[in-house]
Amino acid sequence: MAGPVAFFAVFFAYPVVAIVGRGLEIDGVWQFGRIGEVLGRSDIQQVLWFTVWQALASTTLTLLIALPGAYVFARLDFPGKRLLRAVVTVPFVLPTVVVGTAFLALLGRGGLLDELWGVRFDTTVWAILLAHVFFNYAVVVRTVGGLWSQLDPRQEEAARVLGAGRFAAWRRVTLPALAPAVAAAALMVFLFTFTSFGVVLILGGPAFSTLEVEIYRQTAQLLDLPTAAVLTLLQFAAVGAILAVHARTVRRRETALKLVDPAQTARRPRGAGQWALLGAVLATILLLVLAPLGVLVERSFDGPGGYGFGYYRALASSDASGGAFLVPPIDAVWNSLSYALVATAIALAVGGLAAAALTRKAGRLVRGFDALLMLPLGVSAVTVGFGFLITLDKPPLDLRGSWILVPLAQALVGVPFVVRIMLPVLRAVDERLREAAAVLGASPLRVWREVDLPLVRRALLIAAGFAFAVSLGEFGATVFIARPDNPTLPVAVARLLGRPGELNYGQAMALSTILMVVCAAALLLLERIRTDKTSGEF
Amino acid sequence: MSTTKKLTVTAVAAALGISTLAACGGESEDSSTGGSKSKTVTLVSHDSFAASPAVLKEFTQETGYTVKVLKSGDAGAALNKEILTKGSPQGDVFFGVDNTLLSRALDNDLFTPYAAKGLGQVSDEAQLDKDKHRVTPVDTGDICVNYDKKYFADKKLAPPQSFDDLIKPEYKNLLVTENVATSSPGLGFLLGSVGRYGDEGWQDYWKKLKANGVKVVDGWEQAYNEEFSGSAGGKKAKADRPLVVSYASSPPAEVLFAKPQPTEAPTGVATGTCFRQTEFAGLLDGAKNEAGGKALLDFLVSKKFQEDMPLNMFVNPVVKDAKLPELFTKFGAVVDKPETVAPDKIAKNREQWVQSWSSLVLK
């Protein structure tokens, strides 16, 4: 456990505390009075209120729209299911700069909805809410659907044999078993939308602001560090509370359920009801997930001389960007891939060790550490980025000009996923197997290699895939951290979008499409190696 | 338990591995930025910095220094990072502080004074720190309303030319601009209105602009690529606002980045709606390679760099005899009387103006 603790202390706690201290400490005296001052401001209260309100609304909407999807993915068998499950996960790991652009095209003027029914959502809060559903659809489908597919349907059938109606049987048997998973998914969605940054910044326009957006504005734009520090603390407290509740739900969820192989629970749809449900879910996915992604792809091929690969070819030449990069934009792909690989290695090492330590030990301290590992998901990227900048500038940790900073920051976001995926699997390994091996004379390393590794290998691969995809799409922290001139994919997209002209715009769309395809490929690979026994939380 | 110990050992090893990697990275940095005989000079800038590789190579041939560019976020964030890391800067020269943020940089004593060679050729109105030479002017750009030529031709309506025009009923619901708090063209447009109507009049002007249906979005990217019907992105997004707050150099960019290049720019500039932005560079206090930094500042105002700049960053040179590329003279707009506001006046009022603007326009 020492390793992960040290990692988090140096690369997370220390920078964050330092930047908060910069705002709240004057001549060695902490100015806690500031907290009250800032919280008393009516504009800050408005931000707080909106943050909570939109997170609640987004969570409710996501559950409403995604739960039928979770059922369909868990219980129905249809061609292309694996591909579709990978595709709905793509938004989750895409950077918001990319998605915002596509989403506006869909929901705004002249968008698909506008053309079909004359419905426009841009500049309304609906755009934010729907984008949140788009991003978090997969969280519900994977968390709830994953468990749902492993619940033994015979239990429900037994209830029906005993005279319960279809709905009553579902309500009495399946729902209670699912409830913790639903709660866990809801809390994750709540956490992600509570700390929403890019979506609100791009789709909300200037009228809407969440805590996270406000921290960014106060730090990066106004340099009002005291206010930013107070808001950071506030967000910290809120996220801490959400995580505490989440940890409790998860623990309750780990109570023994009789799980079965998901391959046996899914079957072809039967009856008009199931077909209609499948149709409705597929239509939802088509409209809400595939359409925005499709818009990006369409625009990337839509050159001035008709459809073609013009923008993709332009990516390979450094002249096409007018010197914006000094290197061909396509280089961003290799930068991104190598950064993500290093980030994945770090996340696996830190997260894997943390998960292993958490499995072996119980107790309040360890459980606290468990929740702590999730914190990076809820802490503003700009806080971490600026913290890195002012703390990692002296030997022995003079990393400011070093490329390793980017993978380090990305790994911070990847670790929580690794832990969440590894933990249930590691916990499921029977301790007696290890003991038996030890009694038979195996060294601890050998025990790990012969007993643990074969059992967790698949989970490890899935964790790696997720960490990889998340690192690939990470934008917030990456963009704030000083680095030599080798942009990652999302950063390159943002820069291209920041310049006028057709070629730049087209190249941004082409790079976005590449990013999307790489993410989808990584996730599709995961679908192939998904363990049958247990799926972890994602 | 012993397994845990084993894992801990592995963890430490992994951590060591990471720091070794980092050390490698660090070493190569050191060899380039550290020491007085360093051959690398580091330029910290915002994301929009761009220069032709050939021109940077020429600098290396002339001086022996290699330029390393460190892009550090948008203009505001890049400057704020330098303020936070003051005394232990990330590089030697900072480029990209403009007249709207100049006093924030100067008040924080970010720069070591240095009078660059060739300052004599730099136009007077750009030299806003003339006596102390803490910053060197590098370029100017005008923030102006751009219009979609096709829209106005189709409607047989003359495009607006001035601030006054924008509040006329025939231009109702046509303009999109950026949030003053988060976007520098947005702030520039507000300052333009302050320059035009003064401390007393600008609020009244914005009330009328709001009544005339101005739309505000958060950033330039969105305003220009998603809302403005004249830009290439906007056309694809089926945008419906034919007026946008952008730059006087946006039309040449629309031509340059189109394939095949059109004979006429699809967009035009309302030259009576402009605010002049001047960008400066300065030698960072605590720079490791001061000599290299000074050479780089000289280079930034040299004719070679100044003439390379327009097509890379879409700004105008500050050096009097620098020639503009044909693309600019042919498709760009000449702004005769841009609005200006003194930097110390901006510094004194910026936050209050932004706040009044927010409550006036956003609420």
Image: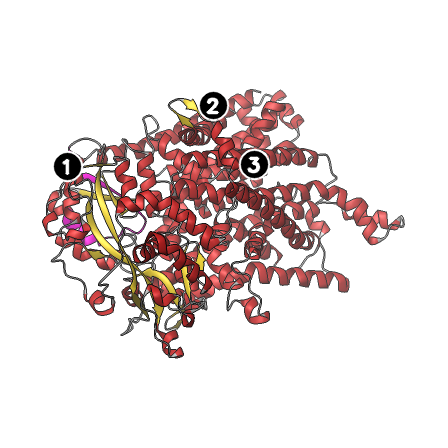
Among numbered discs 2 and 1, the one appearing first in the sequence: 2
Quadrant of the rendered image containing residue A239: top right
Residue displayed at 34% across by 34% down: B84
Residues packed near mark 2 inside 10 Å, few (<14), some (14 to 19) or many (20 plus) = some
Between the C-alphas of marks 3 and 1, the distance is 48 Å
In percent of width and height, residue B18 lies at 39, 31
Element assignment for label 2: helix
x and y, in percent, of residue B285 in the image: 23, 34
SS state under label 3: helix
Q: SS of the residue at dot 1?
A: helix
Residue of label 3: A239
Which quadrant would the C terminus of chain A be assigned to in this image?
top right
Nearer-the-camera pick, A124 or A390:
A124
Q: Which mark is residue B9?
A: 2
Q: Amino acid at mark 2?
A: Val
Of all residues, the one furthest to the right in this rendering is: A163
Q: Is residue A384 visible?
A: yes
- The reply, left or right, for residue A346 in relation to residue B261 is right
The image position of residue A199, as x and y in percent, is 50, 51
Q: Is residue A181 above or below residue A199?
A: above
Please tell me whether residue B53 belongs to the stretch shown in magenta.
yes
Number of numbered tags placed on the structure image: 3
* Numbered label attached to residue B291: 1
Side of A22 where A195 appears, left or right: right
Q: Which residues are magenta?
A: B37-59
